[in-house]
Image: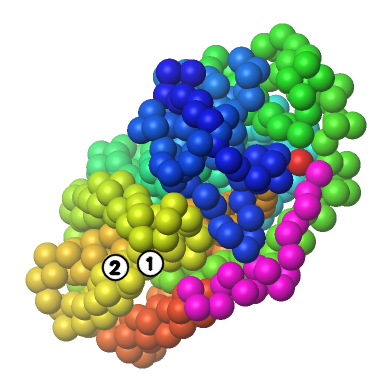
Amino acid sequence: MDNEKSIPAHTSSAMVEDIHEYDEREGYVIDLAAETGNVKLAADGHTRLIPQPSDDSNDPLNWSWTKKHVVLFIVSFAAFLPDYGSATGAVTLLPQAAQWHMTEDHVNHSQVGNVFMLGAGGLVVVALSAYFGRLPVMFYFLVVATATTVWCAAATTFESFMAARILNGFFSTVSQGGGLMFIYDMFYFHERARKINIWAAFIILSPYLGPLLAAFMIASKPWPVPFWVYTAETVLALVLTILFVEETFYDRRIAPSAQPSPGTRVSRLLGISQYRSRHLRNSLIQAFSRLFIVIAKPTVFLACLYYLLTFAWVVGINTTLAIFLTPLYNFGPTQIGYFYFTPVVAVILGEISGHFLHDFLAKQYIQSHKGHFEPEVRLRAIFVSLPFMVVGLVVLGQSLEEGWHYMATSISWGLYVFGIMITTVALNAYCLDSYPEASGEVSAWLNMNRTLGGFIISYFQVSWAQSQGTKISFGIQAAIVAGSFGFIITLMVFGKAMRLKSGALNFKTA
């Protein structure tokens, strides 16, 4: 490999044999500058490659930089689609309500069902991937997602549209719920935070680009047009998957000489090759039971609960903001479209900041702890993101109720979104570092809680604001975000002890 070299080292055999290179008591041993032995290192000459790659060319860790990042981009683009399509309906509900003679809030219920399925579908994706493999699940789910996007665009009644939206949410979420699996399979420990940052940026950006583009379209086109565009984007993701995405699962417990035959490209895409070697992976019962074993871990449960309580307002605001902005500022579709540039910029700034922040915090800890690293270090980034989220929500509520200039509303929304971007990466990296063999399960549960919070709040965001005012409703939301930070403090102080007490997962495969 062109990014590694081997040096002699005195490293315990138990640590080298552990495919995750992770000891619950010692954490990760990252820096081996003072060691000698036969351990593969990164190009800097002292960063241990975790996990240690095999000598097999089929090992995804041995793939070229280009191949890895092509797959990462396609997986991230596919993860972009669910929230993009979901939030497109946040703008189209205006002409739909007029066409179907319903209230805007009633039409918004199609959003709610779609949002819930974005989380539920991810859980099923991960379980099926643990049994069938990553690639065929992604392929088949995208095929059905494509069909349901066509249905959404062609629907002529609210009932038909809502059914299509619910099914589309379930199947479109395939690489959103299970994206961490691909990142874990292809990248080393010291690379993962940056790759999660890229993947998360696509996810967090998508619910803002959807309404932004849809608003400009419906200004001069009928409401199905944005959904036909969404259909074209889903078809593109499917075609790219067929052409370029590879099966990334590789069992490091099996010697390279004993690895099952990868088969042909078509057989891997359709899942034929993976099905032939299914006896080497989890049974279907084991695959589904993994989900419940992972969420029962206290650290994962608390991280997911925190994410639910902080991200719920993202979905709530996004699916209802057009209802607030239209009467307050007399905005039409075009003005609402321009308004969505704010969170787009906020996500981009969050991605750029996170690219440096998460690595800086990790390297700082490693240097001051003799080359060791603990997963709880990832949570330090939330100290940075918390003030942005709290201040953003408070000012947003004040601005909407007091009728402040729309720029105040815009900037406060951007502050909150910026904080959410950094928080998302921190939580995903923390859970992945804590339980690397459960990359799919922690990804799915975080995604489920992200969407579950939005599912709940979307039902009463508008009526809550109308009954108590946005000052109080958004102020309470800010207080919940601030109060739930106690879960993060608990994890930082007691997280390691919780992990030790609850024990390792000991899954059959990663």
Task: Out of 362 and 138, give the one closest to the viewer.
Answer: 362
Decide: is 34 above or below 405.
Answer: above
Colouring mode (rainbow / by chain / secondary structure / one colour):
rainbow
Residue at 61%, 51% in the rendered image: 22
Quadrant of the rendered image containing residue 296: bottom right
| Separation (CA) of disc 2 from disc 1 | 8 Å
Vertical side of 25 occupied by 84: above or below: above
Q: Amino acid at mark 2?
A: Val
- Asked whether the residues under the numbered discs 2 and 1 touch, taking CB atoms below 8 Å apart as contact, a structural biologist would say yes
- Quick check: 294 left or right of 414? right
Read off the magenta span. 492-508
Secondary structure beneath dot 2 equals helix
The residue positioned 78% from the left and 16% from the top of the image is 257
Residue 496, magenta (yes or no): yes
Amino acid under disc 1: Arg
Question: Circle 1: is it few (<14), some (14-19), or many (20+) Cα within 10 Å?
Answer: some
Q: Number of marks in the image?
A: 2
The tag on residue 380 is: 1
Residue found 88% across the figure and 49% down from its top: 285
Callout in the foreground (2, 1): 1
What residue is pinned by disc 2? 384
Residue 405 on image: x %, y %:
10, 71
Q: Provide residue 383's location: percent of width, then percent of height.
A: 33, 71
**x and y percentages locating residue 288 in the rendered image:** 80, 51
